[in-house]
Amino acid sequence: MDFHHLLRSTLPTFVGNDSNESNDTTNNILETLTPFLGTQFNPLLRLFMVFYNIAGGRLSFLGADPTLILTAVGLLWAANKLWDQLSYQIFKIVQRYLLASIQIDSDDEMYRHIMKFLAARRDMTNSRSLTAETWFATAWEENDEPDLLKTTISADGEGLYLNFSAQEAKAPPRFTPAIGMHSFWFEGRYFILHRKKETLFDQNAGPWGGSQYKDKELLVLSCYGRSPDPIKKLLQHAKLMYYSDHDAKTCVRRPANQSMRRYGGRNSWQTVANRPVRPMKTVVLDERQKIQVLSDMNEYLHPATPRWYANRGIPLRRGFLFHGPPGTGKTSLSFALAGIFGLDIYVISLLDPSLTEEDLSSLFSSLPRRCVVLLEDIDTAGLARPSDDDSDDDVKDDKDSSDKEKDSDDKEKKTEINIAELARELRRASSSEPSEKKGISLSGLLNAIDGVASHEGRVLIMTTNKPESLDEALIRPGRVDLQVAFSNATPEQARELFVRMYEADRNPIKSKKKKQQSQRHSLLAILLTAIYSRLLSLYAIRKKAAEKKINPKQELSNHAIDKVKTTEKEQDGNLTDISTATTAVEDSSSPVSPTTPKGVPDNNSVVSPPQSEKPVEPTELAAIAAEFASKIPGGQFSPAEIQGFLLKRKRAPRRALEEVDAWVAATIEQKKSKTKVVQVQ
């Protein structure tokens, strides 16, 4: 087939209007390209020939050969492709023999460590390829306090209230490296980070055991060299950085969801909170009991204890039972113990419908070497021996059947026995349904606590309000080694609560900074208020002097006398307006802000706290606390009730002392009447 003739017939006629040299060059190129492109690329050939003829005419006029230029462009393109392939092969060789790498799975805690480390590096956050993540501050961070104070508004015109509407908008996102290749320097080493995402198909990852796709991220840290020690040092540094702000916090963990628990190991637990360490002095308990629990737990956690237990064939386990009325501090003591010894708390709810005995055993086996396992309200879990009720029913049924045997013949006796057996089976079937819903039986819990394959080294704490309702096998020695009884508050404990509630915060660095800042703000506010008041008084005096034609100096001296009288009358601690106190000008024409709410001072006024809310000295606080404790009857109020009463008056210790009598009488009357409606709070 003659492609040259076909191409000439398909191209426009203006192609051949150039010089003969250009036509010959064009014909040669067309003869070369036509077998490769084919006739179906007529639009492409048309466009190419248009630009080629235009450029060819210009270049031929300048003495340059367009063919050489196109050849050079083709050579550059081929060289680029060759370099890409060559560099890729070189990188694969270097990666195989000269590059050490460590992979980190997104399900592992180390993934969060390294991501926090990368998010804190400026060279990584300034990269051109980033991923933005929503980051929420915890409840214990104080970085946003100045912004919150600036957003104070008057919500209803009667007072000042904080406005948190802009809190989410002001929270900055966290930037981390995006999916792909990144590089950075750390301690003189060049590291390569490869972040990639994989989609896996899991047949049993669905909420009801169905199949679903799951996204999984993988971090690959690499460095040049034959040893991965630099990467290990980097990971250790990231871990120390991650836990640097956890030294004064207690990590609370709970079982992960059912789809994650089936993987076992590190996937069995998830972190739900990081709370500040609770001081032991905040726990309302007898000092002898505190010392006993602390000494026992300290002896158990000593590094030499495992060897001592192993030499004597004793399982390395320790159990505590905290029992007492609600609100007496059982859970508080658990958190305080974990904070003192720097342990994490693993909380398990036996009423979780998705928790099975197999899951419970897996959770206990995946616990770390030293930790605190908390089982709250163990009496409400419904743990009981199923054979006890059945045996009682069997005895009762046998007794009934024996009574009926005396008054019936052999045939009727056989019928009665069959009916009794049928009734027992029905009761067993009905009683087995709720036990299956609860998921955990007493035997399953006992096997998880101290079975043959149970975990050793943990501290088990169980709390209950009714210790008498617990099974004897659950609290026998070996499972529960120490019982701690909690009771309602005594007068001495009420005094400790009062002192702790109203004593000054013991943080010298922060308190000193806040005190200096508040002093500067107070001095500035007083100075501005004095200047404004002075200007306002001069304006009012000159206005009256102009109206009454009197001497301004005489008027000023009269108002100074009135000022002293007014100040003496306002010593009751109520709100004092400095502009009024300093000038004593009662002029209806004085400018008043229409937006100022009632009872709230404007910019030219200073708020003086009421007498009951003024700070108290330590000696006065001790006297008030002793008097407060004398008004609390011992053994009738839980520490939580007393603390709730004081929290409503957390800035007014004198008012708490004045109102405690009415609160005690109303609460005692409420408990006698067994009503849940609180009359006095």
Image (cartoon, helix red, strand yellow):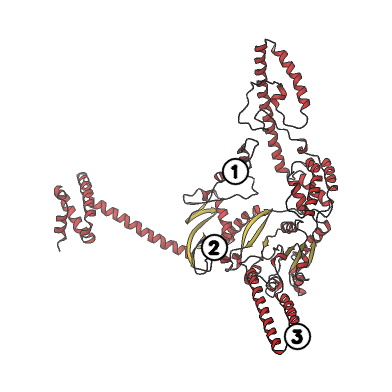
Secondary structure of the residue carrying tag 1 is loop
Residue nearest the observer in this picture, 35 or 591: 591
The residue drawn where x is 81% and y is 39% is 617
Identify whether 142 is placed above or below 188: above
Q: Position of residue 165 (x, y in %)?
A: 57, 43
Q: Is residue 281 visible?
A: no
The residue drawn where x is 78% and y is 31% is 572
Mark 1: few/some/many CA within 10 Å (<14, 14-19, 20+): few
The residue that mark 1 highlights is 164
Secondary structure of the residue carrying tag 3 is loop
Give the numbered dot on residue 407.
3
Q: Earlier in the sequence, mark 1 or mark 2?
A: 2
Give the residue type at disc 3.
Asp
The residue drawn where x is 66% and y is 79% is 425
Q: Which residue lies most toward the bottom here? A: 410
Q: Nearer the viewer's eye, disc 2 or disc 3?
A: 3
The residue that mark 2 highlights is 105
